[in-house]
Structure formats: structure tokens, C-alpha cells
Amino acid sequence: MKIVIYITGDPHGKFERIEHFCGKFKTSREDVLIILGDAGINFFGWVKDHVKKEFLETLPITFFCIHGNHEQIGSYQEKLWRGGVVYYEKEYPDLLFAKDGEVFDFNGKQTIVTGGAYSVDRMYRLIHGYGWWPDEQPSEEIKQNVERKLNELSWNVDVVLSHTVPLKYEPTEVFLEGLDQSKVDRTTEEWLDKIEDRLNYQKWYCGHYHTEKKVDKIEIMFENIKKYNVDMVETGIIDIALRDVKGNVRKLTDLKGKVVLLDFSVFQSPAGAPHNLMLRELYNKYAS
């Protein structure tokens, strides 16, 4: 049976759409649903959370959750899963939370995770006794661990999963009206911006903003559930990977911003030699 990996945005404890999705597409326990933060599984910290977890364990899918800004992990244990460390509880083995800075293998794609964000409604939550946790944003230790891992990978990964976005990609059109944006702590977004500037990656998925938006290789998700397939770039082109004359593997997405000519021909055909000479002339003319 082929394992299918799906991805979606913040449920905030409301899993009806996911329950419907599992039934419609007949998912299995081996399939994985990536949740980009604020799953709402560990929000209350008491029996209400356990009732929700009991329900989620009945769904035929494994949950892989990113740390949001309305989340608490508590006394979870750690284990190795798909190459990275996750948090889990023995009673609920199919509800997994990613440890920030870990790299996971999803269908052969190296995927690094870094969660957390600032709660713009922090004061409201504190005044009214709603859930808020001081570790909602990544600590300096977590940031150092993420950067150390990226150094080990020579700043090359296939996919980034985060809760919030790099600063330059903030969807300002969905900001709350009347909120003084000058008082919003954007240190996480600023840090992610520096990461994004330096990182070589294929795709970056985020949640947090309760909207659906694609800009460049960044995709912000909310209620949509889609297959985790980063080989299909936004133009609909398959991200072909071939070796160059030096034997190095090059992908189409590595050449973004450059002119690429893909030519498929039969080398030993009568037209092969003059055709190759024509390609050489084109290369000499336009190569930089």
C-alpha cells in the first residue's frame, strides 16, 4: 500500500473537515497529515484535551503537528520518526509533534521544521484567562539548533515547514483592523527572513494567518488539505533532476531566474549531428 502524505493549516481544535477528508479519500493509518501549527490538541491541558485525542486516534491517519503559538507539549516523550525527533504520548501514538530544528524524510524530501509565532491577542488571552504560553516563539537555543542543522546540510533542504512566515512574505492584507502593528513582536519573522535569504530550498509551507496564499516558493495554508508533492512547482512543471557535464545533479528549481532550454531528441538519428550543432550555437550565443 502506498503511503500518502497530506498537508493543511491550523485546525484550532476543529477537526470536522479532517474527519470528512479521511472518510472521503479512505485514508489509512500509514498515511500522514502535516498540520502547520495550532492543532488545538494541547490547548486546555486537562480532560477536554484527552477527549479530543481519543477521537483523533479513531481517525485513519497519523498526525504530524508543527509547534504553533497556541500550543503546549507538556510531559511528552521523544522518539525517532522518519529521521527526526518527535514528541508523543504512549496513549496516543499517532499524534506526533515535531521537535524544532529536526529534519524529516517525507517521500524522499529533506524537510526541516521550525515552529512558533507571536500571539497578537496575547494581552486579551492573559486578561480573560485563555491559553497563552511563554515559549510560543522559538528561543535563542532553538534558533541556534536550527542554524546548526542547516550548516550541517550546507544550507540545502528540499522543504521548510514553519508556523509563521519570513517577514517579507507576511500577508498584510489579512492583518486585523484596529491592531497597532508597531506593537507586534516580529522577531521570529525577521529571523526566518534571514534564513530564507540564505537557504536553497524547493518549497516553504506555513500556517498561522488563516488564509490561503502562494508567493514565489512560499505557500500559506489554512483549511485546504492537499497532497505533499513538492516536485510540482507552481508553474505546473515537473522539477526534473539531471546530471550536468561535471556529474552534479541539477534541478529545474535550482535554475530559477535563468533561461533553460530542454531538448529531447534521438542522438543517433540522421538529424542528430546538425541538431546538436544548432544547440551548441544557441549555447555559445546566450550562455553567461
Image (spheres, rainbow, N blue to C red):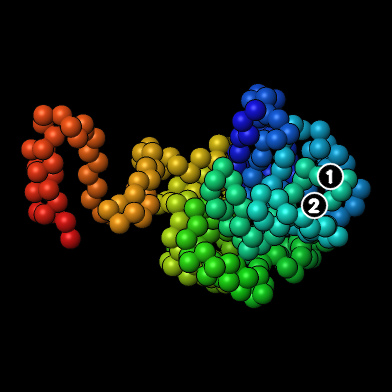
The residue at 11%/29% (across/down) is 270
Q: Position of residue 191 (x, y in %)?
A: 53, 70
Identify residue type, mark 1.
Tyr
Number of numbered labels in the structure image: 2
Describe the element under mark 2 as helix, strand or loop: strand
Label 2 with label 1: CB-CB less than 8 Å: yes
Which quadrant would the N terminus be assigned to in this image? top right
Which quadrant would the C terminus be assigned to in this image? bottom left
142 versus 47 height, above or below: below
> Relative to the observer, which residue lies in front, 233 or 129?
233
279 versus 71 height, above or below: above
The residue at 51%/40% (across/down) is 229
257 versus 199 height, above or below: above
Left or right: 156 in relation to 64? left
Q: Quadrant of residue 185?
A: bottom right
Res. 181 in view: no
Q: Position of residue 87 (x, y in %)?
A: 77, 55
Indicate which disc residue 88 carries: 2
> Relative to the observer, which residue lies in front, 210 or 152?
152
Q: Quadrant of residue 187?
A: bottom right
Q: Position of residue 198 (x, y in %)?
A: 44, 67
Q: Quadrant of residue 224?
A: top right
Indicate which disc residue 92 carries: 1
Q: Position of residue 225 (x, y in %)?
A: 59, 37
> Relative to the observer, which residue lies in front, 53 or 223?
53
The residue at 61%/38% (across/down) is 5
The residue at 73%/54% (across/down) is 80
Res. 142 in view: yes
Q: Residue furthest front?
A: 268
Identify residue type, mark 2.
Tyr
Q: CA distance from mark 2 to mark 1?
A: 7 Å
Describe the element under mark 1 as helix, strand or loop: strand
